[in-house]
Amino acid sequence: MKVLVTGGLGFIGSHTVVELQLKGFDVVVIDNLSNASTDVLDGIAEITGKRPEFEKIDLRDKASVSEFFKKYPDVEGVIHFAASKAVGESVENPLLYYENNLNTLIYMLQELSAKDNANFIFSSSCTVYGQADKLPITEDAPVKPAESPYGNTKQIGEEIIKDTCKVKKGLNAISLRYFNPIGAHESAAIGELPLGVPQNLVPFITQTAAGLRNELAVFGNDYPTPDGTCVRDYIHVVDLAKAHVVALERLLNEKNESNYEVFNLGTGTGSSVLEVIESFERVSEEKLNYRIAPRREGDVTAAYADTHKANDVLGWKAGSSLDEAMLSAWKWEKKIRNL
Ligand code: UD1
């Protein structure tokens, strides 16, 4: 069965391609290589013994999207990762984000709507909840005004899919709201490759320990949390990747309860920034150079998932601990820096 993975050479995309291939799916990847390289295909082949088909396409080019579906009429499912994801950059260049994250989604849905039956998985984010009033966060928690154009593209993206599913009954879609994906494949054949200075906590930690950065700035220790630092739900990227396969199978096996569903993907456990640092130091046996710095604008105090719906309805549960995820991230960083 053929599955299209857009953005399939990126961090979450590449790990999902691996899990799909391990389950016997035939994968074709679209990526525009704006934030990834074709070396990732080698990493995927190293783990699975198979190189996925690859098409270098920029999904903003509507004609290319149509051409793709003409060339691959047998695609039965689409997992759509391709999007820009840097919050700060989205504030600087909102139109780039609206074009890249929304036009591409619209072109994809236009193609899928023309089919009698189509199955679509969308990369959404817990960012849609903002600072939730109640923790853990359930899927019916209200969507809060977005803090950034990036966050807004996830909210609008979900609305676009929901509205389309209302009128296109052959289109089945699931939005997956990720909490904080971290880690790498245990083989260290694929992992996260941030461009430039990492904005996210875990790659900043591993790059600091690897000597690429002087010190980690912990953004604020005066939050109303047990140790004063922000709390997040860090989920191992391989667990997250497996959830995509389960979600796709739900649609392919017609187990979905309606043609548009939403699931949170997290572990259900919140960890503070200091706890993440402690975990890193424990598993790596390295001392991390860090200092407390002022708060970062736009950060929420605490966010972690209520995982009941994902566990009970989707039938998926995160299996890895924070320590396992941190160890895999460190193993990957050491490999790419030849340490
Ligand atoms: C961020 C985005 C979120 C996006 C997600 C994708 C922001 C405000 N939010 O989530 O919209 O969906 O990435 O992965 O950018 N931290 C430090 N020092 C650092 C980096 C981070 O202390 O150098 C802290 C942050 O204050 C936060 C935690 O680490 O408390 C996690 O930060 P990060 O990895 O950037 O993720 P989020 O901000 O949760």
Image (cartoon, rainbow, N blue to C red):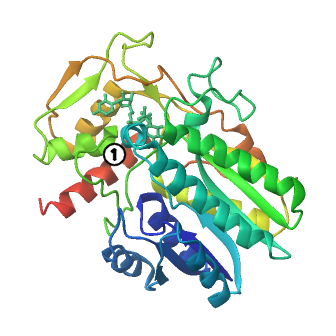
Q: Position of residue 318 (x, y in %)?
A: 57, 48
Q: Quadrant of residue 101?
A: bottom right
Quadrant containing ligand 1 reads top left
Q: Quadrant of residue 185?
A: bottom left
Q: Is residue 125 placed above or below 194 in the rendered structure?
A: above
Residue at image coords 75%, 32%: 140
Residue at image coords 48%, 66%: 7
Question: Looking at the figure, which quarter contains the N terminus?
Answer: bottom right
Asked whether residue 125 is in view, the answer is no
What is the three-letter code of the residue carrying label 1? Answer: Met
Residue receiving disc 1: 326
Residue at image coords 31%, 25%: 274
Q: Is residue 296 placed above or below 288 in the rendered structure?
A: above
Asked whether residue 164 is in view, the answer is yes
Q: Position of residue 62 (x, y in %)?
A: 59, 72
Residue at image coords 31%, 35%: 279
- Out of 70 and 28, give the one closest to the viewer: 70
Q: Position of residue 153 (x, y in %)?
A: 57, 44
Left/right of residue 22 with respect to residue 121 in the rendered view? left
Q: Residues within 10 Å of mark 1 (few under 14, many from 20)?
A: many
